[in-house]
Image: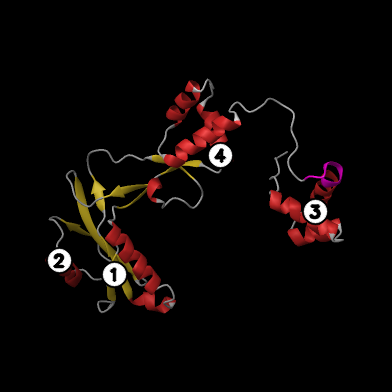
Amino acid sequence: MAKTKELSKDTRNKIVDLHQVGKTESAIGKQLGLKKSTVGAIIRKWKTYKTTDNLPRSGAPRKISPRGVKMITRTVSINPRTTWGDLVNDLQRAETKVTKATISNTLHRQGLKSCSARRVPLLKPVHVRARLKFAREHLDDPEEDWENVIWSDEPKIELFGKNSTCRVWRRKNAELHPKNTIPTVKHGSGNIMLWGCFSAKGPGRLIRVKDRMNGAMYREILSKNSISKGIEDETWLGLSA
């Protein structure tokens, strides 16, 4: 039988609060979207032990002590690129011998997962401020306004050299935190630069940029390679910094 998901402490406390104001188990279950048996078990536990906290369980203790858990959690929070091997060595120096799987499971319980680092443009502070200003100015723009915008960008494709995946320990929805990303630049050898665009009406042409991009070249690309089907008069917005 599959293990059921454990209720959060807030939900368990809410069950007790509703019980104390006279709600029946059925009514509480309906209100919170829970089975009556689940509600009843929480209430019986509270009546017996006067707590909704998890009680001590039988079985072997955790291989990593609470202090060790805090140590490795702090380590990956400071440096998300810390490897399993680094953590194994840290714990061994603290006289705790564990496997990579044990470390992974421990960090998962702390809400941390090993994920591929997101590649993002290398932005200077002035670029960050400009992007934030643009986002705030257009936050409430109606959807139809964006149908008149063409978005363009110049991605770089590596031909040689290291372009491997880097993994980071991070929490959910933290993939764009600067510590969890890999900054990228649009110059260097062993790669080709492309230009592309799209709008609500579809994608445009994909153009190879053979020389270093400058203002004159960019204007020439825009004039010759707009998206087809008569949308040349739409507003252009570049995605690059």
Q: Is residue 100 left or right of residue 177?
A: right
Residue occupying image coordinates x 46% and y 26%: 90
The kind of secondary structure element at disc 4 is: helix
Q: Earlier in the sequence, mark 2 or mark 1?
A: 2
Q: Give the residue pinned by disc 4.
A: 108
Q: CA distance from mark 3 to mark 2?
A: 66 Å
Circle nearer the viewer, 3 or 2: 3
For this rendering, which residue is in front, 128 or 216?
Answer: 128
Q: Give the residue pinned by disc 2.
A: 215
Location of residue 206 in the rendering, given as x and y in whole percent from the top left corner: 24, 60
The label on residue 168 is none
Q: Earlier in the sequence, mark 3 or mark 4?
A: 3
Q: Quadrant of residue 65?
A: top right
Q: Earlier in the sequence, mark 4 or mark 1?
A: 4
The kind of secondary structure element at disc 3 is: helix
Instruction: Give above or below for 35 relative to 168.
Output: below
Region rendered in magenta: 46-51
The kind of secondary structure element at disc 2 is: helix
> Could you tell me the amino acid type at mark 3?
Val
Q: CA distance from mark 2 to mark 4?
A: 48 Å
> Could you tell me the amino acid type at mark 2?
Gly
Q: CA distance from mark 1 to mark 3?
A: 54 Å
Q: Is residue 55 visible?
A: yes
Q: Give the residue pinned by disc 3.
A: 16
Report if residue 184 lies within the magenta region: no
Q: Give the residue pinned by disc 1.
A: 237
